[in-house]
Image (cartoon, rainbow, N blue to C red):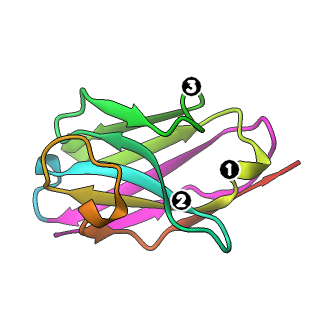
Amino acid sequence: QVQLVESGGGLVQAGGSLRLSCVASGRTFSSYSMGWFRQAPGKEREFVAFISWSGPSTYYAQSVKGRFTISRDNAKNMGYLQMSSLKPEDTAVYYCAATRILGLRTNVHDFDSWGQGTQVTVSS
């Protein structure tokens, strides 16, 4: 497993932008695919975005497609989620996660390394 720590959350007005970061330590981060998930109060944790271990393959939940961009820098052991045109319904705790399972992964159970989460609050 890798250890993951998120940062970059905060309070932003609707229409604004935030960039979340995820720093990895431990095992070789470049061999892990990465995902971002979010969990709003009273709701289940849901998939947001995925990026493959090598970086060229990405996938997004329909609710964020065109507004969020996932990326990674394996040389720095970093992952990112650029969020734009934020909406109040994007308010949640955001988690980065890592998996060594090959192929596109969107299920929380496919990821075995998780960060502690960072709060994103979008005001209307």
Mark nearer the N terminus (3 vs 2):
2
Query: Which residues are the magenta region?
Result: 1-26
Q: Pick the quarter of the image with the N terminus.
A: bottom left
The residue tagged 3 is 66
Dot 1 alpha-carbon crowd within 10 angstroms: few under 14, some 14 to 19, many 20 or more? many
Dot 3 alpha-carbon crowd within 10 angstroms: few under 14, some 14 to 19, many 20 or more? few
Q: Position of residue 66 (x, y in %)?
A: 56, 25
Query: Which amino acid, by three-letter code, is at mark 2?
Result: Arg
Report the number of discs: 3
Residues at marks 2 and 1, CA–CA distance in whole angstroms: 9 Å
Q: Which mark is residue 90?
A: 1
* The quadrant where residue 25 appears: bottom left
Q: Kindly identify the residue that appears in the image at 13 percent across and 55 percent down.
A: 100
Q: Kindly identify the residue that appears in the image at 24 percent across and 68 percent down.
A: 112
Q: Are marks 2 and 1 in contact (CB under 8 Å)?
A: yes
Mark nearer the N terminus (1 vs 3):
3
